[in-house]
Amino acid sequence: MLAIYYTQKSEVMTPLFWEWCRQQLPPIIRDRIERKVSREKIQTSLLGYLLLKESFERNGLPQAIDMIKQSPTGRPNIVQDFDFNISHSAQYAVCAFSKKYSIGIDIEKIKPISLEFLQSFFNQDEWAELHQNENTQEQFYRLWTKKEAVVKADGRGLNIPLKEIIIKNNQGFVERVKWFLQEIPLDKNYMMHVATNEPISEYQRVKISFKG
Amino acid sequence: MEKSALIDVLKIQIIQQLNLDIDPKTITEDSFLFGDEGLGLDSIDALELVVLLDKNYNIKVGNPEDVKEHFKSLSTLADYVLENSSVVA
Protein backbone atom coordinates (compact mmCIF):
# COMPACT_ATOMS: atom_id res chain seq x y z
CA MET A 1 0.00 0.00 0.00
CA LEU A 2 1.09 3.52 -0.76
CA ALA A 3 -0.37 6.56 0.98
CA ILE A 4 0.04 10.16 -0.11
CA TYR A 5 -0.69 12.59 2.71
CA TYR A 6 -1.06 16.25 1.83
CA THR A 7 -1.81 19.53 3.52
CA GLN A 8 -2.27 23.10 2.42
CA LYS A 9 -0.90 26.23 3.99
CA SER A 10 -3.48 28.94 4.56
CA GLU A 11 -3.60 32.61 5.46
CA VAL A 12 -5.46 31.87 8.67
CA MET A 13 -2.52 30.05 10.19
CA THR A 14 -1.45 32.27 13.09
CA PRO A 15 1.93 32.68 14.82
CA LEU A 16 0.43 30.56 17.60
CA PHE A 17 -0.27 27.79 15.09
CA TRP A 18 3.30 27.89 13.77
CA GLU A 19 4.66 27.73 17.30
CA TRP A 20 2.48 24.67 17.89
CA CYS A 21 3.93 23.10 14.71
CA ARG A 22 7.48 23.69 15.96
CA GLN A 23 6.71 22.09 19.29
CA GLN A 24 5.44 18.90 17.61
CA LEU A 25 8.83 18.13 16.11
CA PRO A 26 12.02 16.83 17.72
CA PRO A 27 14.60 19.61 18.26
CA ILE A 28 17.04 18.03 15.79
CA ILE A 29 14.52 18.39 12.93
CA ARG A 30 13.31 21.80 14.10
CA ASP A 31 16.85 23.18 14.24
CA ARG A 32 17.60 21.89 10.76
CA ILE A 33 14.46 23.49 9.31
CA GLU A 34 15.10 26.81 11.03
CA ARG A 35 18.53 27.25 9.51
CA LYS A 36 16.72 28.61 6.46
CA VAL A 37 16.21 32.37 6.15
CA SER A 38 12.86 32.37 4.30
CA ARG A 39 9.85 32.25 6.59
CA GLU A 40 7.70 30.74 3.82
CA LYS A 41 10.18 27.94 3.25
CA ILE A 42 10.46 27.30 6.98
CA GLN A 43 6.68 27.04 7.20
CA THR A 44 6.27 24.57 4.32
CA SER A 45 9.19 22.50 5.69
CA LEU A 46 7.48 22.42 9.10
CA LEU A 47 4.27 21.22 7.48
CA GLY A 48 6.19 18.54 5.54
CA TYR A 49 7.71 17.08 8.69
CA LEU A 50 4.43 17.39 10.53
CA LEU A 51 2.81 15.32 7.77
CA LEU A 52 5.59 12.78 8.16
CA LYS A 53 4.94 12.55 11.89
CA GLU A 54 1.22 12.16 11.20
CA SER A 55 1.86 9.41 8.62
CA PHE A 56 4.06 7.53 11.10
CA GLU A 57 1.34 7.76 13.75
CA ARG A 58 -1.37 6.59 11.36
CA ASN A 59 0.78 3.60 10.44
CA GLY A 60 1.49 2.51 14.01
CA LEU A 61 4.97 4.04 14.25
CA PRO A 62 4.62 6.88 16.77
CA GLN A 63 8.31 6.76 17.77
CA ALA A 64 9.69 6.88 14.25
CA ILE A 65 9.89 10.67 14.01
CA ASP A 66 12.56 10.64 16.73
CA MET A 67 14.70 8.21 14.73
CA ILE A 68 15.11 10.18 11.54
CA LYS A 69 18.60 10.41 10.21
CA GLN A 70 19.83 12.15 7.15
CA SER A 71 21.62 10.25 4.40
CA PRO A 72 24.92 11.74 3.18
CA THR A 73 23.05 13.19 0.19
CA GLY A 74 20.53 14.93 2.41
CA ARG A 75 17.60 12.53 2.03
CA PRO A 76 15.95 11.95 5.42
CA ASN A 77 15.61 8.23 6.01
CA ILE A 78 15.32 5.51 8.61
CA VAL A 79 16.78 2.10 7.96
CA GLN A 80 13.57 0.17 8.45
CA ASP A 81 11.05 -1.87 6.53
CA PHE A 82 9.16 1.15 5.31
CA ASP A 83 9.97 4.19 3.22
CA PHE A 84 8.80 7.77 3.04
CA ASN A 85 9.54 10.94 1.16
CA ILE A 86 8.48 14.57 1.57
CA SER A 87 8.05 17.32 -1.02
CA HIS A 88 6.69 20.86 -0.94
CA SER A 89 5.96 23.67 -3.32
CA ALA A 90 4.26 27.01 -2.69
CA GLN A 91 1.11 26.25 -0.65
CA TYR A 92 1.34 22.45 -0.49
CA ALA A 93 3.35 19.95 1.52
CA VAL A 94 3.07 16.24 0.65
CA CYS A 95 4.41 13.06 2.21
CA ALA A 96 4.42 9.62 0.60
CA PHE A 97 4.58 6.61 2.95
CA SER A 98 4.76 2.90 2.20
CA LYS A 99 5.55 -0.34 3.98
CA LYS A 100 5.97 -2.06 0.63
CA TYR A 101 7.71 0.19 -1.88
CA SER A 102 10.77 2.38 -2.11
CA ILE A 103 9.40 5.80 -3.01
CA GLY A 104 10.21 9.30 -4.19
CA ILE A 105 7.71 12.13 -4.57
CA ASP A 106 7.86 15.57 -6.14
CA ILE A 107 5.29 18.34 -6.32
CA GLU A 108 5.78 21.61 -8.19
CA LYS A 109 3.56 24.61 -8.65
CA ILE A 110 3.08 25.26 -12.36
CA LYS A 111 4.45 28.76 -12.86
CA PRO A 112 5.77 30.19 -16.12
CA ILE A 113 9.43 29.45 -16.76
CA SER A 114 11.56 30.68 -19.69
CA LEU A 115 12.34 27.32 -21.24
CA GLU A 116 14.13 28.89 -24.22
CA PHE A 117 17.15 29.47 -21.94
CA LEU A 118 17.21 25.92 -20.65
CA GLN A 119 17.71 23.66 -23.66
CA SER A 120 21.06 22.38 -22.38
CA PHE A 121 19.28 20.82 -19.41
CA PHE A 122 17.31 18.39 -21.56
CA ASN A 123 18.02 15.43 -23.81
CA GLN A 124 17.17 15.89 -27.50
CA ASP A 125 14.14 13.61 -27.29
CA GLU A 126 12.82 15.40 -24.22
CA TRP A 127 13.21 18.79 -25.84
CA ALA A 128 11.36 17.61 -28.95
CA GLU A 129 8.59 16.10 -26.86
CA LEU A 130 8.15 19.27 -24.81
CA HIS A 131 7.59 21.26 -27.96
CA GLN A 132 5.23 18.77 -29.58
CA ASN A 133 2.86 19.32 -26.75
CA GLU A 134 0.16 21.95 -26.89
CA ASN A 135 0.86 23.04 -23.33
CA THR A 136 4.65 23.16 -23.19
CA GLN A 137 4.78 24.56 -19.66
CA GLU A 138 2.55 21.86 -18.23
CA GLN A 139 4.51 19.21 -20.13
CA PHE A 140 7.76 20.63 -18.71
CA TYR A 141 6.46 20.28 -15.15
CA ARG A 142 5.23 16.77 -15.97
CA LEU A 143 8.72 15.75 -17.13
CA TRP A 144 10.45 17.63 -14.30
CA THR A 145 8.39 16.10 -11.47
CA LYS A 146 8.93 12.64 -12.99
CA LYS A 147 12.71 13.17 -12.97
CA GLU A 148 12.73 14.64 -9.49
CA ALA A 149 10.58 11.81 -8.11
CA VAL A 150 13.07 9.31 -9.57
CA VAL A 151 16.07 11.25 -8.19
CA LYS A 152 14.47 11.33 -4.76
CA ALA A 153 13.52 7.64 -4.83
CA ASP A 154 17.09 6.77 -5.84
CA GLY A 155 18.32 8.71 -2.82
CA ARG A 156 21.59 10.04 -4.21
CA GLY A 157 19.99 13.45 -4.69
CA LEU A 158 21.44 15.89 -7.15
CA ASN A 159 24.61 13.86 -7.45
CA ILE A 160 23.00 12.22 -10.46
CA PRO A 161 23.13 14.43 -13.56
CA LEU A 162 19.52 15.05 -14.57
CA LYS A 163 20.27 14.19 -18.19
CA GLU A 164 21.16 10.68 -17.09
CA ILE A 165 17.65 10.06 -15.85
CA ILE A 166 15.73 8.77 -18.82
CA ILE A 167 11.96 9.05 -18.76
CA LYS A 168 9.92 6.81 -21.06
CA ASN A 169 6.23 7.39 -20.56
CA ASN A 170 5.59 6.28 -17.00
CA GLN A 171 8.93 4.66 -16.33
CA GLY A 172 12.18 6.29 -15.28
CA PHE A 173 15.66 4.82 -15.61
CA VAL A 174 18.79 5.69 -13.63
CA GLU A 175 21.72 3.68 -14.91
CA ARG A 176 20.02 0.25 -15.11
CA VAL A 177 17.53 0.71 -12.32
CA LYS A 178 13.92 1.07 -13.36
CA TRP A 179 11.37 3.17 -11.47
CA PHE A 180 7.60 3.27 -12.02
CA LEU A 181 5.89 6.64 -12.18
CA GLN A 182 2.39 7.68 -11.30
CA GLU A 183 0.92 11.14 -11.74
CA ILE A 184 -1.10 12.10 -8.67
CA PRO A 185 -3.79 14.69 -9.39
CA LEU A 186 -4.16 17.24 -6.60
CA ASP A 187 -4.71 20.78 -7.87
CA LYS A 188 -4.85 22.10 -11.43
CA ASN A 189 -2.08 24.59 -10.66
CA TYR A 190 0.34 21.90 -9.48
CA MET A 191 1.99 18.82 -10.93
CA MET A 192 2.91 15.82 -8.79
CA HIS A 193 4.53 12.43 -9.47
CA VAL A 194 5.48 9.52 -7.29
CA ALA A 195 8.19 7.01 -8.26
CA THR A 196 8.12 3.46 -6.86
CA ASN A 197 10.39 0.44 -7.31
CA GLU A 198 7.41 -1.73 -8.36
CA PRO A 199 4.25 -0.82 -10.26
CA ILE A 200 1.55 0.29 -7.84
CA SER A 201 -1.95 -1.09 -8.14
CA GLU A 202 -3.55 1.47 -5.88
CA TYR A 203 -2.78 4.35 -3.61
CA GLN A 204 -4.59 6.37 -0.99
CA ARG A 205 -4.62 10.16 -1.15
CA VAL A 206 -5.32 11.61 2.28
CA LYS A 207 -5.90 15.27 3.10
CA ILE A 208 -4.68 16.35 6.55
CA SER A 209 -5.81 19.59 8.15
CA PHE A 210 -3.69 20.66 11.10
CA LYS A 211 -5.56 22.75 13.58
CA GLY A 212 -2.90 23.34 16.21
CA MET B 1 32.56 45.88 -10.91
CA GLU B 2 33.76 45.06 -7.39
CA LYS B 3 32.72 41.62 -6.20
CA SER B 4 30.99 43.00 -3.12
CA ALA B 5 28.89 45.38 -5.24
CA LEU B 6 27.98 42.53 -7.59
CA ILE B 7 26.92 40.39 -4.63
CA ASP B 8 24.55 43.14 -3.49
CA VAL B 9 23.04 43.34 -6.99
CA LEU B 10 22.74 39.54 -7.25
CA LYS B 11 20.99 39.39 -3.87
CA ILE B 12 18.27 41.75 -5.06
CA GLN B 13 17.93 40.08 -8.46
CA ILE B 14 17.61 36.62 -6.92
CA ILE B 15 15.04 37.76 -4.36
CA GLN B 16 12.99 39.43 -7.10
CA GLN B 17 13.30 36.78 -9.82
CA LEU B 18 12.57 33.92 -7.42
CA ASN B 19 9.91 35.86 -5.56
CA LEU B 20 11.45 35.12 -2.15
CA ASP B 21 10.23 36.51 1.17
CA ILE B 22 13.77 37.23 2.31
CA ASP B 23 15.25 40.38 3.78
CA PRO B 24 18.54 40.95 1.88
CA LYS B 25 20.16 41.90 5.18
CA THR B 26 19.69 38.35 6.51
CA ILE B 27 21.88 36.77 3.83
CA THR B 28 25.63 36.98 3.61
CA GLU B 29 27.97 36.19 0.73
CA ASP B 30 28.57 32.77 2.28
CA SER B 31 24.92 31.83 2.88
CA PHE B 32 24.13 28.58 1.10
CA LEU B 33 21.75 28.96 -1.82
CA PHE B 34 20.43 25.37 -1.75
CA GLY B 35 19.72 22.73 0.86
CA ASP B 36 18.69 22.96 4.48
CA GLU B 37 20.56 26.11 5.36
CA GLY B 38 20.44 29.63 4.03
CA LEU B 39 18.10 30.47 1.17
CA GLY B 40 16.80 26.90 0.84
CA LEU B 41 16.33 27.10 -2.92
CA ASP B 42 15.00 24.09 -4.83
CA SER B 43 15.71 22.60 -8.24
CA ILE B 44 13.22 24.79 -10.12
CA ASP B 45 14.87 27.80 -8.46
CA ALA B 46 18.18 26.55 -9.90
CA LEU B 47 16.67 26.75 -13.37
CA GLU B 48 15.41 30.27 -12.60
CA LEU B 49 18.97 31.23 -11.66
CA VAL B 50 20.22 29.89 -15.00
CA VAL B 51 17.63 32.08 -16.74
CA LEU B 52 18.64 35.07 -14.61
CA LEU B 53 22.32 34.67 -15.55
CA ASP B 54 21.45 34.48 -19.23
CA LYS B 55 19.05 37.45 -19.22
CA ASN B 56 21.08 39.78 -17.01
CA TYR B 57 24.67 38.73 -17.62
CA ASN B 58 24.58 37.03 -21.02
CA ILE B 59 26.02 33.87 -19.49
CA LYS B 60 24.98 30.57 -21.05
CA VAL B 61 25.24 27.78 -18.54
CA GLY B 62 25.94 25.12 -21.15
CA ASN B 63 26.79 22.33 -18.77
CA PRO B 64 24.22 21.67 -16.04
CA GLU B 65 27.04 20.20 -13.93
CA ASP B 66 28.51 23.71 -13.65
CA VAL B 67 25.49 24.66 -11.60
CA LYS B 68 26.49 22.49 -8.66
CA GLU B 69 29.95 23.98 -8.40
CA HIS B 70 29.15 27.64 -8.94
CA PHE B 71 25.74 27.98 -7.33
CA LYS B 72 26.89 27.15 -3.79
CA SER B 73 26.72 30.65 -2.34
CA LEU B 74 26.45 34.27 -3.46
CA SER B 75 30.23 34.44 -3.31
CA THR B 76 30.81 31.51 -5.71
CA LEU B 77 28.02 32.80 -7.96
CA ALA B 78 29.61 36.27 -8.10
CA ASP B 79 32.98 34.72 -8.99
CA TYR B 80 31.30 32.76 -11.78
CA VAL B 81 29.64 35.92 -13.13
CA LEU B 82 32.85 37.93 -12.99
CA GLU B 83 34.72 35.20 -14.87
CA ASN B 84 32.12 34.57 -17.54
CA SER B 85 30.04 37.66 -18.16
CA SER B 86 30.68 39.93 -21.10
CA VAL B 87 28.34 42.48 -19.50
CA VAL B 88 30.02 42.95 -16.12
CA ALA B 89 33.60 44.12 -16.28
Image (spheres, coloured by chain):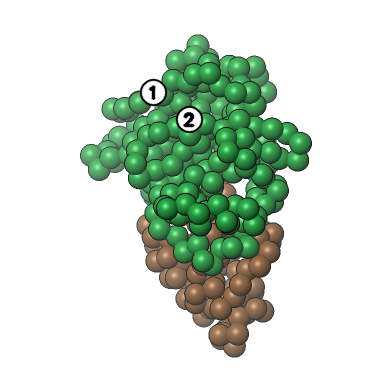
Q: Which numbered disc covers residue B50?
A: none
Circle 1: residue type: Val
Where residue A85 appears, x then y in whole percent?
A: 55, 31
Identity of the residue drawn at 23% across and 39% down: A12
Q: Which numbered disc covers residue A95?
A: 2
Circle 2: residue type: Cys
Residue occupying the far front of the picture: A132
Identity of the residue drawn at 56% across and 63% down: A118
Marks 1 and 2, the one that precedes in the sequence: 2
Tag 2 secondary structure = strand
Shade representing chain B: brown
Where residue A172 appears, x then y in whole percent?
A: 64, 38
Quadrant holding the N terminus of chain B: bottom right
- CB contact under 8 Å: marks 1 and 2: no
Quadrant holding the C terminus of chain B: bottom right
Residue A61 drawn above or below residue A39: above
Colour green belongs to chain: A
Where residue A197 appears, x then y in whole percent?
A: 65, 26
Q: Which residue is mark 1?
A: A206
Q: CA distance from mark 1 to mark 2?
A: 10 Å
Identity of the residue drawn at 51% across and 39% down: A106
Tag 2: Cα neighbours inside 10 Å, few (<14), some, or many (≥20)? many
Q: Is residue A5 at all visible to an observer of this figure?
A: yes
Chain letter of the residue beneath label 1 in the structure image: A
Query: Exactly how many numbered labels are in the figure?
Result: 2
Please state which of residues A37 and B47 is positioned toward the viewer in this rendering.
B47
Residue occupying the far top of the picture: A60
Chain letter of the residue beneath label 2 in the structure image: A
Identity of the residue drawn at 56% across and 84% down: B88
Tag 1: Cα neighbours inside 10 Å, few (<14), some, or many (≥20)? some
Question: Residue B59 lies in what quarter of the image?
Answer: bottom right
